[in-house]
Image (cartoon, rainbow, N blue to C red):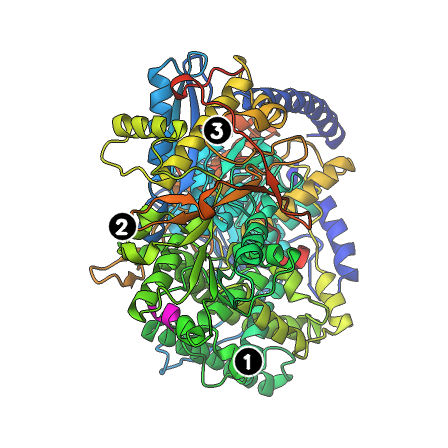
Amino acid sequence: MNKSIRMKRLSIVSAVVATGAMLLSMLPAQAAQTTGVTSSEIKLGISSPTSGSAGLVYGKVPGAMKAYFDYINANGGVYGRKIKLVAKNDKYTVKGAAASTFDLVYKDNVFALTGALGTATHQAGYKAASLAAENVPDLFVNSGWSGFNDKTAYPTTFMVLPTYAMEAKVMAKVIKDNFPGQATFIVAQNDEFGDDARAGFGAAGHKFTREFFYPQGGMDLATGKTILSAISAVPGKPVVVLFGTGDATVAMLKAAEELKLTKKFTWLAGSVGADANTLLALKVEPETIDGVLTASFMPDAKDSTDTYVKQFMAINTKYNKGVVFDNYVLAAMNSAMLTVQSLRAAGKNLTRDGVIKAIETKGSSFASAGLVPLGYSSTSRIGYNGYWVSQINAKGEGKPFGGKLVIYTTDSGTGAVSVSNFVRPTMPKNGIPTNS
Amino acid sequence: MKNNKLKNGLAALISTTLVAAFAVVVPSVAQASDLTCSTVNKVETCKGTDDNGAKFEIRMPAKFNGTLFVYSHGIRYGVALPANPAAGTPAVPIDYSPEVAPTQEVASALLAQGFALAGSGVEAQGWNLEESVYAAIRVLDIAQNKYEKVNKIVTWGNSLGGLASQALAEQYPDLVDAAAPICIAESAQAEITMAGDFLWGMKVLFNPNIKGTGYSTGTAGYIEMLGDLGQVRATLTEIKTAIGVNPLKPTWPTTSTVPAALKAIPVRSAVMLLGLVSGISTSSNTFDGVAGPAGASETTFGAALSPALAVLENGADAAGLAVLANYDMELRAGGVVYDNSTTNFSTRLGTAGTTYAAALSGLDSARGILGYLALMPRVKADGAAVGRLNSMYQLQGKITVPTVVISSTGDHITPPGAAQYLINQYNASVTKKSAKAGSLAVIWNKPPNEYTKFDKNGSYITPTVPTNGVGHCKYTTAQVVTVAKIAATAAKTGKLPSTTAIKTAIKKDENLFVNPNFKPDLLKFRQ
């Protein structure tokens, strides 16, 4: 073929291809807005651990969310659409979360993710599945890493937890107000979790007598005993801050049991690793947890007088049979309720952009069990903005420390920790949102 | 006519070659000399040696459909290796034999469908990018001269051969109708940076007896290179044994001279860090980075141990490659080509530090090792040698013939970032109007999410058959044939099939996908 003719034909082909490409590039973008949505169904996905040691602690999350969605589905769904939750076990591994999230987006074609659990895991999942480029709403992530509030890096993400830095600042205030003069120690996970804590305590001006950091998965009974032995001779009743996951809290408390040091210290456990039911289930003695302080943003899961807790307990009994109701179940159902409100707030013509916009504009007023305010706005993707301090008793109940509920709010930076008079919105009738 | 185009192309090629730093002898018109042909099972196979001394092979089926695939093989040792009885490895001579397809199964499948195949053994091995391009052109010419019924030509290749096929298509688009690089390699500098960083890290952290770069000339250098291969093997074996004895707190090699404070960190985490700063994959032949033995320890194994063990397994290949490639490239370029004189390994780690904090035994451990690396003497390359290395063709992404690429997300030698670099270059070229829009399709091969197996005692099992998509250039016959047929179709029509058609072609394969939003990290050299 003559080269000039060939070139001419190629330019025509190129023009046709280019025009086609333009059309194609428009069509998928429009289609992607409603991926996972049909006239009768909204498909959501969650990547979280349901096996291994992480599964022992967090394994109830997807089941509890599904139970709440089943309850909503039985009551008309979201504008007539039923929610289908596709759950993947990422085993709390980076590669697992990357693969699970990828599959949820590209194979299961979910409309949005909800309740993804873990910082490192979700960082990997977000990147692997190109959630930003795909514009997939990433709802109510179970992580307090302040990095998820970076709207540039995570434009579709909404956290549900307060940041770990906020938690550390509230803890610092509690220590300062209630345990002056006592030595203080922190035992924390040596990753972004612990780094955020360091930043928060630093911002609050708190200096620990000594710090102990361990890698995720690196806290065991022997390590716990080594740490406690090293500080057992410190006079008074030192405060030990446990800033890690539930398995690490268990290891530390059981180490204290073996060394008979449970009452030597004031234990102040972070919200992530202080579910009383889980601690008891993992064989921590009731008398050990009696008196443990913990920061929380949710009501206590054993408080059946709380309207939200009572409703969620009833849903759990009917739709999540055989699963013990605890703080993880409560938090998961609460996130599911927030998800339903987000979908409703986006309107009947559901789109991905619509959901993101709806949370930015209406999310701070969503009904939720949380006892502290939600902080969603066009500039903030952080969920709850504060804590209250609970004291666990031997039954595993969490009661307000000092006998009165005090709600603290703060930011992730150098802002002050303030006492808030926040009153949460009334629960929707029967726990079924009707917002728009 | 292709022959006319070939002559024009060769004229340009010659002028290019005359100014090239590497001496590559190219005839003005390639000659088929001493062709020896035989026919078995209705396939005529012709073998010969071209004027540059490269052995070649052409296979022509009786029911030829008009399309010829010209294959460029991957990197081979540029030096002969003696047997090593201690390691149980046989002597490895330099391999100059021609290849016409990635595997014999692929060759048989394509021949059965009427495609003709050709390939050269290339007259020089090692990083033979330029020789490989010209050898492919010569065998292409010889095949066309012998078989006038050839009317469409696809250039394709594996790994370095994939890079060669892309280089051929970009430089001489009039010679071919389509291209299909498989597990395409990045540039020499990008690849040697990845492997070299890992090797340098091994030297400063685990075994200062490793020379790594700056090999002497002549026999002395050859002996130094062999010595390094032995040191690398021994060091990695020692680390692997230590992890086997105590996975949670394995000890450092006896040759290590790092301070005691660093040795308090499990050595697997130091290996992990080297992998992350080098860009070595965190999944490998045995370890998927996810699965663990059933029970409570599943989480710790999957999160903390498996990624590090994967890096160790991949690192053995990377370090061996670094020794051989450094030796080869230094000989070719006349000086040290690996350079880390300005590398900031903390920056290199980036967000992977938090993502893999568990496998790193915590951020403080990572910071400690990074601090030590920052203090270590660095390697400064010879500028002139690097210049000669980079005088080899560098991909521009100037794609004007339909090109289909397949790349595995788990390839530890030619990571998916190599294909992403081609995509980036191509997109830039389209913007500059030096490439045609809609001319590049990339098919990704994603391994199964989990494939690590454990025995009843919870010990991992190293598979004897690699998992598809894991390891270097591991594809099924069906996958490669699918890519080849897409390229052949494009060669005939002059344009790529639509994305929908490509998705349809691959939809039965769970590992394959196409998605423009999937953007793997570039190799560290490009970051």
Q: Is residue A222 magenta?
A: yes
Q: Quadrant of the N terminus of chain B?
A: top right
Rendered view: A378 above or below A434: below
Q: Chain of mark 2?
A: A
Q: Which mark is residue A368?
A: 3
Q: Which residues are magenta?
A: A221-225
Q: Nearer the viewer, residue A85 or B305?
A: A85
Q: Which residue is mark 2?
A: A281
SS of the residue at dot 1? Answer: helix
Q: Nearer the viewer, residue B195 or A11?
A: B195
Q: Are marks 3 and 1 on the same chain?
A: no
Residue at x 38%, y 13% (from the top left corner): A76
Q: Chain of mark 3?
A: A
Q: Cβ–Cβ below 8 Å for labels 3 and 1?
A: no
The residue carrying pointer 2 sits among few (fewer than 14), some (14 to 19) or many (20 or more) residues within 10 Å by Cα, namely few
The three-letter amino acid code for the residue at tag 2 is Ala
Could you tell whether A315 is left or right of B3 in the image?
left
Q: Position of residue B496 (x, y in %)?
A: 58, 30
The three-letter amino acid code for the residue at tag 3 is Ser
